[in-house]
Image: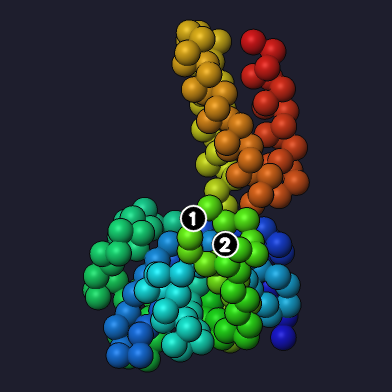
Amino acid sequence: MEYDLSKVGVEKDLQYECITTTISKDGIKNAGAFAFVYLGEDKVHCHLFEGSKTLQNILDTNEYVVNITQDPLVFTYATLNCLGDEYYTDDADIAIIKDTPAYIIVDVEDIDIKTPENFPINGDSSIYFITGKIRKFVINDDGARAFNRGMSGLIEGLVNFSRYKIVGEEQRKVYMDQLLENQRIINKVSDEKTKKVMDYLVEQYKKY
């Protein structure tokens, strides 16, 4: 079955930030801020480093939920591992964030483990590449949109550019370093339009 994730702003093969919710074998719900990629039709992908509760729950239950939201509180609490029970629906057998604009329930189909010995990873932890099949796609809010980091990086670059011409050399270096890091991220996660305009912005910076 093919799902139309463009309804929530998701394009094939691009990376979006979301809140991944899971439930343990003992019924304890957990949330973490992780990225996912839509592979087309009914397939999605994510990758997680070993050691997280999210990964352990996925390994134990073979399912997870992609919550599509831009709520700053939910992102913060999920990242800091303090999203309280009041943020979840009353479902006992699955973890879904209450009032989330949209969500995708994913059944895990394949897990490929990459170790530091066979994959260019910084650190000693292995990384798990997880491919899954969409079981259910629900839109609760027609305005739901998945968050792509590229736009944030572009906006930061534009804001800094408005100051770039009037600051000293030391601050210019700070802005340029931020710009090039954001360009790296955009080249990794964003669409061709955003990549093109970021390249143009870098050219404008270099004129000064």
Front residue of this view, candidates 153 and 118 = 118
Rendering coords of residue 164 (x, y %): 54, 15
Q: CA distance from mark 2 to mark 1?
A: 7 Å
Q: Residue at x 37, y 83 (%)?
A: 23
Q: Circle 1 sits in a helix, a strand or a loop, which is it?
A: loop
Q: Residue at x 53, y 30 (%)?
A: 178
Pointer 2 and pointer 1: residues touching (CB < 8 Å)? yes
Q: Circle 2 sits in a helix, a strand or a loop, which is it?
A: loop
Q: Based on the displayed image, in which of its 4 quarters is residue 205 positioned? A: top right
Question: Callout 2, which amino acid?
Answer: Pro
Rendering coords of residue 119 (x, y %): 64, 61
User: In the figure, is residue 124 to the left or right of 150?
Assistant: left
Q: Residue at x 41, y 74 (%)?
A: 54
Within 10 Å of the Cα at label 1, are there few (<14), some (14-19), or many (20+) other Cα atoms?
A: few
Question: Callout 1, which amino acid?
Answer: Gly
Rendering coords of residue 92 (x, y %): 32, 90
Q: Which residue does the numbered mark 2 point to in the structure image?
A: 116
